[in-house]
Amino acid sequence: MAYSEKVMDHFANPRNVGEIEDADAVGEVGNPKCGDIMKMYLKIDNNIITDVKFKTFGCGAAIATSSMATELVKGKTIEEALKVTNKAVMEALDGLPPVKVHCSVLAEEAIKAAISDYYQKNGINPEPIVGKVGSCCHEDAPCPCSMDK
Ligand code: FES
């Protein structure tokens, strides 16, 4: 399966690349198998994600999925952003080849890691709300630990 035009577009012209110096929350996740790392910065005002930037050291699909994930959470409330799944990111990109599904999981996890950081900074235990973050395995994605890049 070839990459969709949207994946190619977000890979070649990723949106919201960079970092936010005075970010309200920062999340970083890594994939232990491929070594790719995604870092997500959020600016949150009144429960709304007013700005978001990312840095991804990783494969093309990881860059495209993080770019799309930032577009999907921008302007949303924290609760809405938590509902942005890797599936939603993939659908917005018109799909990914099966071996690249796990890259979209990294994008979902990066959002969750940043929101967890936000809760923690505000004295709230994120785990009951956000769940465990940072697992490379996911129900609808093959575990990258057991597959090659
Ligand atoms: Fe590592 Fe895509 S996230 S290969």
Image (cartoon, rainbow, N blue to C red):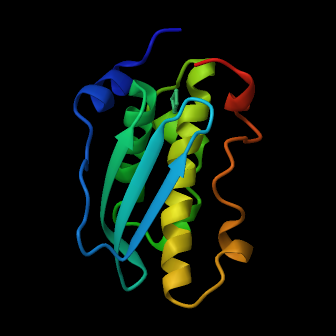
Which quadrant of the figure contains the C terminus?
A: top right
Q: Nearer the viewer, residue 114 or 34?
A: 34
Q: Residue at x 31, y 32 (%)?
A: 10
Position of residue 77 measured from the top left corner of the image (x, y, whole percent): 45, 72
Left or right of 101 in this view: 14: left
Is residue 111 shown above or below 26? above
Q: Is residue 141 left or right of residue 119?
A: right
- Tell which residue pokes out farthest to the top in this image: 1
Q: Quadrant of residue 84?
A: bottom right
Q: Residue at x 41, y 53 (%)?
A: 39
Residue 142 showing in the rendered view? no
Which residue in the rendered view is the most extreme toward the bottom? 123
Residue in the image at 45% along x and 37% along y: 92
Measured along the vertical axis of the image, is residue 72 above or below residue 126? above
Q: Look at the image and tell me whether residue 53 can be seen.
A: yes
Q: How many marks?
A: 0
Residue 16 placement (x, y as % from top left): 25, 50
User: Is residue 45 toward the left or the right of residue 94 in the image?
Assistant: left
Q: Could you say where residue 124 lies in the image, as x and y percent from the top left?
A: 61, 87
